Amino acid sequence: MKTDAGHVTAALSRPDFTLDVDIKVPSHGVTGIFGASGCGKTTLLRCIAGLERDARGSVGFNGQLWQDSENFVPPWQRPVGFVFQDARLFPHMTVARNLNYGRRRSAPSPELSSPEQIIDMLGIGHLLDRKPAQLSGGEQQRASIARALLRYPALVLMDEPLANLDAGRKQEIMPFLDRLHANLQVPMLYVSHSLDEMTRLCDHLVVMQSGRVLGQGRLHDMLMRTDLPTLGGGEASTVLDVRVLDYDPHYQLSRLQFAGGEVVVPGRHGDHCCPLRLRIMASDVSLCRERPQSSSILNILPAVVESRRAESGGHVLVQLRVGEAKLMARVTLKSAEALNLTQGQSLFAQIKGVAVKNSAEQVAIDNANAEA
Amino acid sequence: MPGLGPLWLSVKLGLISTAILILLGTPLAFWLSRTRSHAKTFIEAMVALPIVLPPTVLGFYLLILLGPNGLVGSYWVKLTESSLTFSFGGLVLASILYSMPFVIQPLQNAFESIGRGFVEAAETLGARPLDIFFTIILPLSTRGFLTAAIMGFAHTLGEFGVVLMVGGNIPGQTRVISIAIYDHVEALEYAQAHVLSGLLLAFSFTCMFALYFINGRLRHEN
């Protein structure tokens, strides 16, 4: 038995649960594993790390077999860095000794960041002499992420690292995860049941249900699918990667550039290294044949109809091309017929609301338009 | 003024038995804290027996087992040409059995309270089981070891019935403090009994006070 490069396979059966998963893992970038509680996301990560000893089945990564019916590579010989939901920092050691625990037991890898870079990236330099009990929940989790990275893993596994933190602490730790996402040189599997976290952090998405993979692919493509019931209640959305162009202090609007043109969003965004992501719900996009001359809506983009698909409830899901980018619109069947939507047709898309994923706050553009 | 020999003998017996108990009890307690074996309940009950058994019963069986014709004693005679009963070596063996639950149980509780979480974290950081035992389990069980050592020592110090059965009353060999006090009372030497009893009382209280004091400090630190 062998596994292909760039794959994680895991199969196990227990009396009450069966896991059968084959995931493509890009050589770097974050792969989100999304699904409802009990779908097997956490069990999958634990199998990969070798923490489910009584599990019968097989686990492989990048062509190396870690487990099958005859072999079991123990967890301490698997090059993974595991971040648990509860930070699990050793309470009798300082943060510095916690960080060194994995590092002293691992072969350093020249391609990976130095300890100083990792400590700096997670902003824990001033905490090194403290004991875990003296840290806040967010600080503990940052230290535990640094500890896992200092193991110099070939694969990073994160099991809902934000689930135990309250909303404020989540906001506090998110910028550090953005930096990690931008700087990480090895693949990472990120388990969560929060689509918001996924949209912000992940490049690829795996949707699981009852121990099986329902679908996997690029995040942008996955969010446009409506056949996956667990994804955002079946509501399609588009994710756009954007770059901040400038900020207008008078109107308090940021101008953002994406592959299909420019959009403006209220508020100041992106004063850091990382690209921003916008998530636009299909139901927030409306269509018109002519460019509206006077509208409160700021973002009106020329678009071409690529395809349309009838949805239940008298709606039509329209896939549009805006320059190089794709956009989804959800309109009523009646509007679709009135507009006589056909493939290749040129029209204008009006975007009513945008979620700016790098500050994780929902921004309704038309609110700002009323002020403008 | 009575001789303080019996006190020193008791302290020596306590220190040696406790040291051996900690060394042998740690792996056993760790095994009990982690195993899912059916033998666990059986072993736990065996370890707890000295708590409920009258010391005379334990002493009686030990006398038979350790005697020159006993299962263990006959080998000892062949090996060393001396008897295990009525000797310091026999007392150490008896004390180990008698004080076993007071060492094993605190250790087992300490190991059980650590749980899988830290062990799993250490495993994913590249640590092997023995490494994890010394770097994670032992340091996190300090309070358990302290309790085990003081309880084992203090309990051995107060032992009477078992010693009487297997040890007799040989000065410098098996005449420990509790036996000496009994002898003084029998001989109506109340003054000597007072001195030794007072010493044992003060010593025991100091032990217990130290235990609770240090335990409280350690709890506060964590």
Image (tube, coloured by chain):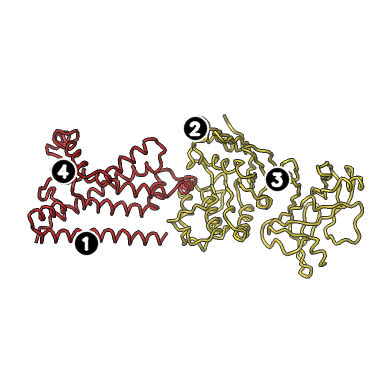
Chain colours: A yellow, B red
Residue under label 3: A231
Q: Looking at the picture, how far across and down is residue B15, in whole percent?
A: 23, 51
**Circle 3 — which element?**
loop
Say which mark, if any, is on residue A240. Answer: none
Q: Give the SS element for disc 1.
A: helix
Disc number lying in front (3 or 4): 4
* Residue A261 screen position, x and y as percent: 81, 55
Image quarter (top left, top right, bottom left or bottom right) of the N terminus of chain B: bottom left
Name the residue beneath numbered marker 1: B202
Question: In this rendering, do the residues under marks 1 and 3 share a single chain?
Answer: no
Label located before the other in sequence (3 or 2): 2
Residue behind mark 2: A71
- The mark closer to the camera, 3 or 2, is 3
- Furthest toward the bottom, the residue is A250
Spatial separation of the CA atoms under disc 3 and disc 4: 76 Å
Read off the chain for label 1. Answer: B
Q: Is residue A40 above or below residue A166?
A: above
Q: Nearer the viewer, mark 2 or mark 1?
A: 1
Q: Amino acid at mark 3?
A: Leu
Q: Which residue is rendered at x = 81% and y = 61% of the image?
A: A366
